[in-house]
Image (tube, rainbow, N blue to C red):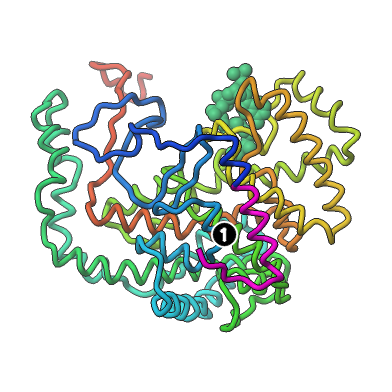
């Protein structure tokens, strides 16, 4: 692939390609056949609690291979995208399925630049006590405020009613007959039947794509405004000549980043843009599947990401590294954690049972940035010492390696992004994955409707209130 960066940032691409070489030498490459093939509905799979292992749909957006340490967007390896691409190009790729040609990329960037100006939404946001709110709650509020105008969903609501009723749970054949296999199979196979009213799909393509672009661009503006309001500063207008990553940093800090800072921020955005059917992506898709709209879907994604089991381990990593304080303290601190059977934040992953490729990229990039921040430089030494200890003890035995959250905090803190703002930064990047997957799912929508096993009682006699 052609290299497109200045000599100043060229070293970053080289660092990433080196990390890729290491990754390739440590894991052999082959997709998992049972997770990379066309589905014949109905599908038999083993499902754990929380739908673990369940296959909900087909996708071409992205693929994570946990045992090989792969992360693929639309067929492209994450190492190559980070080495050669930009967040704008990757967002276009995720949503549209193809890398843009020059003219398409220019038009897409123009659209993002236009959508980055959200003065009206910022004004509305400022009428709330944003400085006292949880930043993710403020981000969700801001995303809802972006949807001030009617969308085509409102205008088409009456027409869509018929379909909404058809999708209502009480009218789903498989629900009316819990043991009716024939109905279930009929329902599952419905996707092979022509979807009703193809004119809606056209409308959906045009209008929803515009909304996806508004969100990819606008959520960053909203996040930056929140970061400033929390610091008792007024939001800043975006600068047209800056990239998405540079604008994000500029609108948060008020300083135009250096090319190296901009490039590293851009790579962080690329790395966090998509990651399979995680909880926030699934939440977005569930909301979209009701034929709600993409703003509400993304609001659901933000809400899901707010939970500590999903976003936020990087905040904890920075706290524990500061608590350890010195590389010399690592052995005793780690021994105490092991003794107490504590999990170490920033290590282990539900899907990756090898090195998380995002950590392989972020570690050397963090090293570049911390070089000019003495406090961060010292903490980085603590981090590498702890990584050595954890990998030596848990790597082989339990496949516990650093994950994306282990080094990302160094980058954000070095870029003057406060620790309690890490999760909103994650959301800003993930909007492109959320929108891409929502948009893809809507092309062949099926309202999500898993079932729960009822294990409660039957035939209980109602006791009047006064007799309980
Ligand atoms: C991410 C996480 C929830 C994945 O969990 P999982 O795949 O379900 O793994 P489990 O929690 O079942 O753990 C499997 C084993 O590895 C151990 N383990 C997992 N993560 C560990 C960690 N970070 N530190 C120490 N031990 C860990 C568990 O104690 C367990 O050991 P056991 O078999 O002796 O009981 C888990 O690794 C974790 O909590 N990590 C720390 C938080 C974090 O960094 N989250 C961000 C993820 S991107």
**Quadrant of the picture in which ligand 1 is shown:** top right
To which quarter of the image does residue 224 belong? bottom right
To which quarter of the image does residue 6 belong? bottom right
Q: Nearer the viewer, residue 210 or 290?
A: 210
Secondary structure under the numbered disc 1 in the rendered image:
helix
Residue 137 percent location from the top left of the image: 55, 56
Q: Which residue is mark 1?
A: 269
Secondary structure mostly seen in the magenta stretch: helix
Boundaries of the magenta span: 1-20
Residue 440 percent location from the top left of the image: 31, 55
**Any part of residue 225 in sight:** no
In this rendering, would 417 be left or right of 36? right
Q: Residue at x 70, y 55 (%)?
A: 365
Q: Residue at x 52, y 79 (%)?
A: 117
Q: Nearer the viewer, residue 219 or 390?
A: 390
Relative to 235, say whether 428 is above or below. above
**Any part of residue 387 in sight:** yes
In this rendering, would 310 be left or right of 152? right
Q: Is residue 374 magenta?
A: no
Mark 1 Cα-neighbour bin, 10 Å: few <14, some 14–19, many ≥20:
many
In this rendering, would 271 be left or right of 377? left
Q: Residue at x 81, y 23 (%)?
A: 336
Residue 377 percent location from the top left of the image: 84, 52
Q: Nearer the viewer, residue 288 or 210?
A: 210
Q: Residue at x 24, y 56 (%)?
A: 443
Residue 247 percent location from the top left of the image: 61, 74
């Amino acid at each position: 692939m052609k290299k497109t960066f200045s000599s100043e940032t060229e070293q970053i691409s080289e660092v990433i390609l080196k990390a890729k070489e290491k990754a390739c030498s440590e894991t052999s490459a082959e997709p998992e056949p049972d997770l990379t093939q066309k589905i014949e509905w109905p599908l038999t799979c083993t499902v754990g609690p929380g739908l673990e292992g369940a296959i909900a749909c087909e996708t071409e957006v992205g693929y994570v291979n946990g045992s090989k340490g792969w992360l693929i967007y639309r067929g492209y390896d994450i190492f190559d995208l980070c080495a050669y691409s930009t967040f704008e190009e990757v967002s276009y790729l995720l949503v549209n399925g193809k890398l843009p040609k020059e003219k398409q990329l220019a038009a897409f960037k123009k659209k993002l630049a236009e959508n980055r100006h959200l003065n009206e939404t910022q004004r509305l946001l400022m009428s709330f006590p944003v400085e006292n709110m949880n930043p993710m709650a403020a981000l969700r509020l801001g995303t809802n405020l972006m949807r001030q105008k009617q969308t085509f969903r409102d205008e088409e609501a009456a027409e869509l009613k018929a379909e909404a009723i058809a999708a209502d749970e009480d009218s789903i054949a498989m629900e009316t007959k819990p043991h009716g296999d024939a109905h279930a199979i009929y329902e599952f196979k419905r996707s092979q039947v022509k979807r009703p009213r193809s004119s809606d799909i056209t409308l959906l393509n045009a209008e929803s794509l515009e909304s996806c672009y508004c969100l990819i661009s606008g959520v960053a503006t909203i996040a930056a405004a929140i970061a400033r309001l929390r610091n008792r500063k007024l939001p800043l207008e975006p600068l047209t000549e800056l990239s998405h990553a540079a604008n994000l940093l500029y609108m948060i800090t008020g300083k135009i980043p250096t090319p190296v800072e901009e490039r590293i921020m851009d790579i962080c955005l690329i790395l966090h843009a998509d990651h399979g059917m995680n909880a926030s992506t699934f939440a977005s898709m569930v909301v979209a599947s009701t034929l709600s709209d993409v703003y509400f879907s993304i609001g659901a994604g933000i809400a899901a990401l707010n939970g500590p089991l999903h976003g936020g381990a990087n905040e904890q990593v920075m706290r524990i590294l500061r608590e350890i304080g010195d590389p010399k303290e690592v052995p005793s601190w780690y021994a105490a954690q092991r003794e107490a059977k504590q999990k170490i934040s920033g290590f282990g992953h539900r899907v990756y049972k090898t090195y998380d490729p995002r950590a392989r990229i972020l570690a050397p990039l963090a090293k570049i940035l911390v070089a000019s921040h003495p406090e961060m430089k010292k903490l980085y030494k603590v981090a590498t010492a702890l990584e050595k200890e954890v990998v030596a003890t848990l790597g082989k035995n339990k496949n516990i390696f650093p994950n994306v959250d282990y080094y990302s905090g160094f980058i954000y803190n070095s870029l003057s992004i406060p620790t309690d703002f890490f999760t909103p930064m994650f959301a800003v990047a993930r909007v492109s994955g959320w929108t891409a997957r929502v948009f893809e799912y809507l092309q062949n929508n099926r309202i999500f409707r898993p079932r729960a096993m009822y294990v409660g009682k039957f035939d209980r006699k109602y006791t009047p209130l006064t007799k309980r």
